[in-house]
Amino acid sequence: MSIRDWPAEDRPRERLLERGAGSLTDAELLAIFLRTGVSGKSAVDLARQLLDEFGGLRALLEADLEVFSAHLGLGAAKFAQLQAVLEMSRRHLAEHLSRDSALESPQAVRDYLTALLRHEDHEVFGCLFLDAKYRVLAFEAMFRGSIDTTNVHPRQVVKRALWHNAAALILCHNHPSGVVEPSQADRTLTMRLKEALELVDVRVLDHFVIGEGAPFSMAECGWI
């Protein structure tokens, strides 16, 4: 049966408009994105099948073009649409941060950095550069490494902080393994960067480790 033949209160689009997106399941949200099903399957049926094949929504959202396009009902056009949606989401988070102090919006900082780094399959080290009121000036992914390590050069971090005329910054890197517990090397690097940046009057507010679940904050543990 086509979704058009369902009772209005059961149709995902109508339910979203009436109750909000949060009331829909992952399959129903994906069905709205897909718009149409395939022969013998409604958009919701297809969405459920895809979520089962990918193992969940996150894996589908983070799949590359080759993997994404190998599944029924998907292809380059849908992949391009999805990437546009994801990028709009990241830019929305960035605009929110640019208006408010990072210290006043800690969850927004976490959400933004997670959106930027959690999908990376190699370690990426980045800096969120802030002005004197701790508003975001820019984010830069400064160093990229292997699946479990990244070489970070304090001199380059200092150089970019001065270029942005930053008064403070938030450090971040991802752990592709998903484990957010910082290593001793992570803690040592953080102290080296903190000391180097203090020489040019730039404050390190935090260092987040991005993985599965909530990011790990070194500041909250008293390590900064």
Image (cartoon, rainbow, N blue to C red):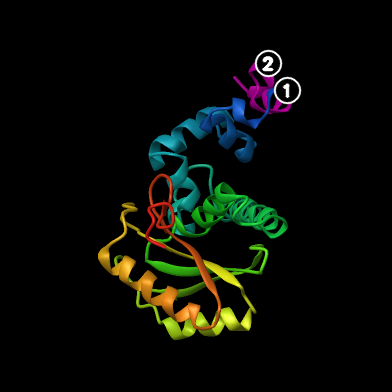
Look at the picture and state if 190 lies above or below 8: below
- Label total for image: 2
Q: Position of residue 208 (x, y in %)?
A: 44, 58
Mark number displayed over residue 18: 1
Magenta span: helix, strand or loop, mainly?
Answer: helix
The reply to whether discs 2 and 1 touch (Cβ–Cβ < 8 Å) is yes
Q: Amino acid at mark 1?
A: Glu
- State how far apart marks 2 and 1 are (Cα): 9 Å
Residue at image position (51%, 34%) is: 47
Quarter of the image where one finds residue 151: bottom left
Figure quadrant of the C terminus: bottom left
Viewer-nearest residue: 128 or 73: 128
Q: Position of residue 16 (x, y in %)?
A: 68, 27
Residue at image position (48%, 42%) is: 72
* Crowd band around label 1 with a 10 angstrom C-alpha radius: few (<14), some (14–19), many (20+): few
| Magenta span | 1-17
Judge whether residue 97 is colored magenta: no
Q: Position of residue 63 (x, y in %)?
A: 45, 53
Badge 2 or badge 1: first in the primary sequence: 2
* Crowd band around label 2 with a 10 angstrom C-alpha radius: few (<14), some (14–19), many (20+): few
Residue at the disc numbered 2: 9
Horizontal side of 196 relative to 29 (left or right) equals left
Residue at image position (29%, 66%) is: 148
Judge whether residue 6 is colored magenta: yes
Q: Amino acid at mark 2?
A: Glu
Viewer-nearest residue: 102 or 80: 102
Q: Position of residue 29 (x, y in %)?
A: 59, 34
